[in-house]
Image: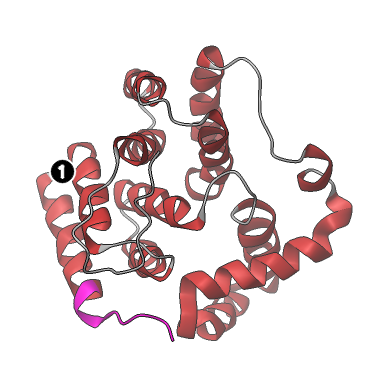
Amino acid sequence: MGDDALTDPMTPTPLTGGTRALVGFAAAIAQGEEPEIRGRVAELVEQQVPPLAIEELLLQSVLMVGWPRALVAASIWRAAAPAPLTPDAATDLDYANHVEWTERGVATCMAVYGDNYRKLRENVAVLHPALDQWMVTEGYGRTLSRPGLDLLRRELCIVAQTAVLDTPRQLHSHLRGALNAGATYAQIDGTLATVNPFISYDDFKRVKELWETVRENWSPLT
């Protein structure tokens, strides 16, 4: 997909074709329209996006869009790639590894949220302790910490999906998370430009305003 994961957020580096195709697929999964998903799968194939990266996006989409839309997208993708891929089935599908999942979940969640990590854990635990544990162990540990797709591209895809789903609080968090993972401003601009056709004019305007707020107030982790 090319190395567009630069560390300097001011570098005007746009998305590569492969990453743009992956982000577009993420947005289509969130939208849930089968013809659009098929078109995005064709683009992934044309751009020669590594199948393992696509598989990982499908798996993480369960967290963002739920099982129904993730399964629809997976069935369309499976028609193009009949053999499912996993980087290490013995490790990543074994529930005996829940301690490892929790450890790597904490590390990934801290990388995404930075100084807001403790506040996030406290706020989610107030909603329900199970939600807090599932978020870290199942979400960030078992799923988002899997090999096969780097954290930067995972976060860009989450930005795309939360924008389409119109969940501004989560979008705000993952705009920051993408920057914390090493995304450039131009890469996030490119992600939002890819999302633009999937949402209304007014919704896109609100997304852009939110992005400007994040951009003005974000500072690199130290």
Q: Is residue 49 above or below residue 96?
A: above
Residue beneath the point at 29% across and 35% down? 17
Q: Nearer the viewer, residue 186 or 61?
A: 186
Residues shaded magenta? 215-222
Q: Secondary structure at mark 1?
A: loop
Q: Position of residue 38 (x, y in %)?
A: 38, 18
81 relative to 180 in the view: left or right: right
174 sits to left or right of 76:
left
Residue that appears at 39% across and 31% down: 32
The extreme front residue here reads 3
- Answer whether residue 183 is magenta in the image: no
Quadrant, the C terminus: bottom left
The quadrant holding residue 144 is bottom right
Question: Which of the two residues, 130 or 28, is positioned nearer the viewer here?
Answer: 28
**Residue 180 to residue 95: above or below:** below
Q: Is residue 116 above or below residue 162?
A: below
Is 220 covered by the magenta stretch? yes
* Residue 30 in the image, given as x and y percentages of width and height: 39, 39
Residue that mark 1 sits on = 200
